[in-house]
Amino acid sequence: MSTAHDVTRRDAIAQYRLVGEPPEPDLQGLVELAATVCNVPTAVINIIDDRMQHQVAAVGIQAASCSREDSMCAAVIGTPGRVVVPDARIDARFAQNAFVTGEIAHVRFYASSPLVTPAGVAIGTLCVFDDEVGELSDASSRALDLLAHQVIDVLELRRVQRDLLASNAQLESFAVQVSHDLRNPLTALSGFLELAADSPEMVDAPRAAQSLSRAEAAAGRMTAMVTDLLDFARMGGARPHVTEVDVADTVDAVLEDLDGVLVSTGAEVTVEAATPVRADDTLLRVLLQNLIANAVKFTVAAEKVPRITVSVETLPDGWRVSVDDNGDPVEPDLRERVFEPMQRGHGAEVQGIGIGLATCRRIVEAHRGTIGLDASPAGGTRAWFVLPAAA
């Protein structure tokens, strides 16, 4: 049975994605250096989980895996610091080990230094051994410890690079979302300008002036959205510009951008509370625009006239904002999955690339909040998010 330490070690190993992967050249270079400085023919980087020992780099033998019970390093992985054994045959920890008795090998000299992550978890060892009795000089002992630290440095660098690639992929998806979010204000802008163009100044000057004013406002919101969203993407969403924002005012701006959609579908959007919250103004607008637009299009897909309600509940340490629709509820087993990029929920015939809710989650998490879906009292879906006061 796995212990709590084994589970922690297994989770730490999983972060590095070593087991079953192609050999890492930098790790191979370190074991070759370890064998040289310790003057032995064999050196190995062993990763030890709750069941197996995995040799992820080796010199002097073919890298392989074995059961944890057969592993010499597993016997000392809980021992802090370096282990040096001149003759394993007379050491109680190793005398009956298959690597010593001849069942697997004939190890005599053995030395290892633990591989300890920055979080303090020992995930394996850098070990050297020989089939002859031997010793390790003070200089070689220090070098073995130093090389073990270098192994962890290589693993951490690999992990960071992998996370960076994943982050870049998210930013690429976010750039797609920027284009998606700009369609609504652009549609509104085009509609208002077209209306102005069809209103001859001599006949309907006030109407033309009003339309042009609304078009200018939509263009201003679009410019602010582009600037702030690209800034947000560049910094990975870590630091939104938080100010006091009135949810009702933000919804009003969203409704201006969604005017064409709302009119064409007969949708009604009601705000039940004009409440100031702490949030990034532009990102909150993108968030609500996505949630309201989703509510409208999926309610229409359910062949109903959309009735959308935006409400705000003040919590002891923040605010909970809900967007309720009267369409169909999202199935419980889909309510988490639809927040993943490129995932679609109910209404597969509805246009979209399945990235809107993923962006919503990213924005909410940048505010250190939470987001989710529930069934709505109105019969459809409730999309909700919590913004902490300390954001």
Image (cartoon, rainbow, N blue to C red):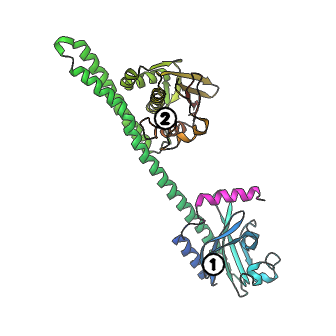
Residue interval drawn in magenta: 1-19
In the picture of the structure, the residue carrying the numbered disc 2 is 347
Residue 281: mark: none
Look at the picture and state if 338 lies above or below 374.
below
Coordinates of residue 279 in the picture (x, y in percent):
50, 30
Nearer-N-terminus badge (1/2):
1
Give the foreground label among 1 and 2. Answer: 2
Amino acid type of the residue that numbered disc 2 sits on in the rendered structure:
Gly
Look at the picture and state if 49 lies above or below 25.
above
Q: Which residue is rendered at x = 57% and y = 63% of the image?
A: 155
Quadrant location of the C terminus? top right
Coordinates of residue 364 in the picture (x, y in percent):
53, 36
Coordinates of residue 143 in the picture (x, y in percent):
62, 75
The answer to whether residue 297 is magenta is no
In the picture of the structure, the residue carrying the numbered disc 1 is 43
- Along the line of sight, which residue is nearer the eye, 191 or 163? 191
Give the structural element (helix, strand or loop) at label 2: loop
Quarter assignment of residue 229: top left
Left or right: 273 with respect to 12?
Answer: left
